Amino acid sequence: MTNPAERLVDLLDLERIEVNIFRGLSPDESLQRVFGGQVAGQALVAAGRTTDGDRPVHSLHAYFLRPGMPGVPIVYQVERVRDGRSFTTRRVVAVQQGRTIFNLTASFHQSEPGFEHQVPMPKVPEPESLPRLGDAIREHLGELPEALRRMERRQAFDIRYVEPLRWTAEELAGAEPRSGVWMRAVGPLGDDPLVHTCALTYASDMTLLDAVRIPIEPLWGPRGFDMASLDHAMWFHQPFRADEWFLYQQESPIATGARGLARGQIFNRDGALLVSVMQEGLFRPHRRPETQV
């Protein structure tokens, strides 16, 4: 497979090795650790594959406990916590080489009518009027470094920042801790709603902590901080397709104690609020080698 969207679908197609146990691939890439969105997306697939399929997921809450090792399969153990009249609950533990690296609790809700309201979608430029992420970086750097070229070739999502990327101290001065991006899968993802939900879960971890980082340093410049996702929560409000444009609005209400909190809202092009997201991340200045313990 050469299409990154096809590779993403393949990545989310877990092998069932027991009734409640699944195994997921972990690409052997030049990364220090497995991408957190991959683990969250695969864990949600495992949870969803143990339900009868007529109840879409409405929320998930997860913790990243240890970094995953690229190239090593991850085993997902599912606990069938509850099968009620309206709600189904699953708990998933991700294990790699005998160690728990991640856990997730997901709740599935049978669709039913109720009252409705939502906040309006912000007014932003249309995605077609904005440069692709790689082109926006090339405009500043002239040519992408090899690491970014590899990332661009394997990237399953087209990402377009609503605001121009900031590169200098002058541009960063006074920048508010918020960011917005248009995203969609770079190719079709099929028609399984669970695949689209898990693909968007994968994508939701890609840029959310941008909102914390923006006042500190350029998003795509040299990184002066150790960054890692600590936990992740999502609430799914309405059906969607991850291979159609969605707007991901992100902001950070606070950063303190080497941690930053970010929250996001995901809208479709018609302005419907699809998903709400919260995440806390580690933001620790690089330690000098002689001070590391």
Image (spheres, rainbow, N blue to C red):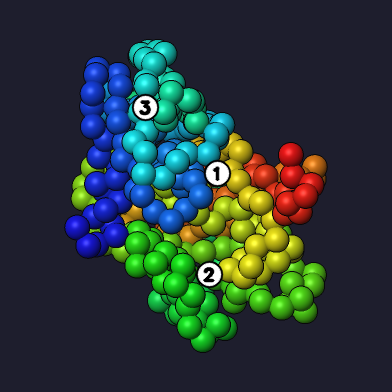
Circle 1 residue? 277
Where on the picture, by quarter, is residue 70?
top left
* Quarter assignment of residue 18: top left
User: Residue placed at 31% from the left, 63% from the top?
Assistant: 186
Residue drawn at point x = 31 percent, y = 40 percent: 25
Name the residue type under label 3.
Tyr
Is 102 placed above or below 210 here?
above
Q: Amino acid at mark 1?
A: Val
Residue 148 is situated, as x and y percent measured from the top left of the image, at: 46, 69
- Mark 2: which secondary structure? strand
Q: Position of residue 116 (x, y in %)?
A: 49, 40
Disc 2 and disc 1: Cα gap in Å?
Answer: 18 Å
Which of label 3 and label 2 is nearer to you? 3
User: Who is closer to the viewer here, 155 or 178?
Assistant: 155
For residue 155, above or below residue 232: below
Task: Give the mark nearer the N terminus: 3 vs 1.
Answer: 3
Q: Residue 161 has which mark?
A: 2
